[in-house]
Image (tube, rainbow, N blue to C red):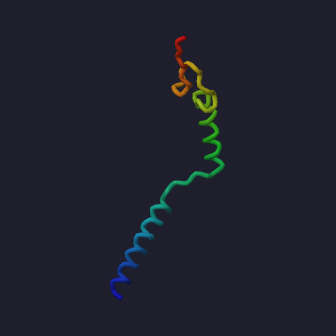
Amino acid sequence: MRHVCSSSFAAMKTVVQQLRLDAGLDRVKVSQAAVDLKQVCLQNGQHDPLLTGVSSSTNPFRPQKVCSFL
């Protein structure tokens, strides 16, 4: 019985330590985070190949041309 009590106490101590760490973190409001994320997306969007596409000459995944001799 004593072992169960000490392991439970250790688990609770770990939980309390984690809660103290979480309470000390600086928080950002969701509205501010959304504004910041939008700004980053607008600033870096012209470099994103998912938004701008990839030219066929620089695309490493383009289908290879087949060479055939007649």
What residue is drawn where x is 59% and y is 36%? 40
Instruction: Decide if residue 38 is on the left or right side of residue 3.
Output: right
Compared to residue 49, the image places residue 5 above or below, namely: below
Of residues 2 and 31, the one drawn nearer to the viewer in this rendering: 2
Q: In this view, does 34 lie to the left or right of 18?
A: right
Residue drawn at (62%, 36%), measured in percent from left and top?
A: 41
Q: How many labels does the image show?
A: 0
**Residue 57's spot in the image, x, y percent?**
55, 18
Residue 34 falls in which quadrant of the image?
top right
Residue 49, placed above or below residue 65: below
Q: Position of residue 15 (x, y in %)?
A: 44, 70
Q: Which of 21 and 54 is in front in this view?
A: 54
Which residue is nearer to you in this view: 21 or 42?
A: 42
Q: Position of residue 33 (x, y in %)?
A: 61, 46
Q: Is residue 25 above or below residue 41?
A: below
Q: Farthest residue in the bottom direction?
A: 1
The residue lying furthest to the top in this view is: 70
User: Where does the N terminus fall, quadrant-wise?
Assistant: bottom left
Q: At 65% from the left edge and 42% from the top edge, which residue is drawn?
A: 35
Which residue extends farthest left? Answer: 3
Q: Which residue is drawn at 58% across and 21% down?
A: 56
Q: In which quarter of the image is residue 59?
A: top right
- Between 50 and 15, the residue placed more toward the observer is 50
Could you tell me which quadrant the C terminus lies in?
top right
